[in-house]
């Protein structure tokens, strides 16, 4: 990760020294949370990456993206993502329908 510029580093330390934050990590966490709150596209991109790597379910990825599962599926489709789904054998489905 690239090091922070001198001005940003000084500002972060000043916020900690002023008692606004308990430490530098808290300043950075707050900044990142605000970044995600203000930029919906970042949430969507993060959700897609987590879903592609199978680190989260479709439902959880939708939640991270801040949308419904249907809306998230549409985003995936628009971005050319092909979802693989498990299909049950026809015989099993027929058997259940007969019951």
Image: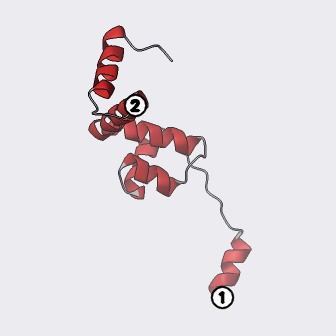
Residue sitting at the far top: 6
Residue at image coords 52%, 38%: 49
Residue pictured at 39% horizontal, 46% vertical: 65
Q: Position of residue 20 (x, y in %)?
A: 27, 33
10 Å neighbourhood of mark 2: few (<14), some, or many (≥20)? some
Judged from the image, the secondary structure of the residue bearing numbered disc 1 is helix
Q: Nearer the viewer, residue 80 or 58?
A: 58
Which numbered disc, 2 or 1, marks the residue closer to the eye? Answer: 2
Q: For this rendering, which residue is in front, 10 or 5?
A: 10
Disc 1 target residue = 98
User: How far apart are the two marked residues, 2 and 1, measured between alpha carbons?
Assistant: 64 Å
Instruction: Kindly identify the residue that appears in the image at 42 percent across and 57 percent down.
Output: 69
Numbered label attached to residue 23: 2
Quadrant assignment for the C terminus:
bottom right
Kindly indicate the quadrant of the structure image that contains residue 68.
bottom left
Left or right, residue 92 beside residue 43: right
């Amino acid at each position: 990760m690239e090091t922070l510029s001198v001005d940003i580093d000084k500002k972060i330390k000043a916020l900690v020294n002023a008692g606004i934050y308990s430490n530098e990590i808290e300043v950075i966490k707050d900044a990142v949370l605000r970044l995600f709150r203000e930029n919906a596209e970042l949430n969507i991109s993060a959700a897609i990456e987590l879903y592609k790597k199978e680190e989260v379910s479709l439902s959880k990825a939708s939640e991270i993206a801040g949308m419904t599962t249907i809306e998230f599926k549409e985003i995936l489709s628009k971005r050319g993502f092909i979802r693989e789904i498990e299909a049950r054998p026809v015989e099993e489905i027929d058997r259940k329908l007969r019951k």
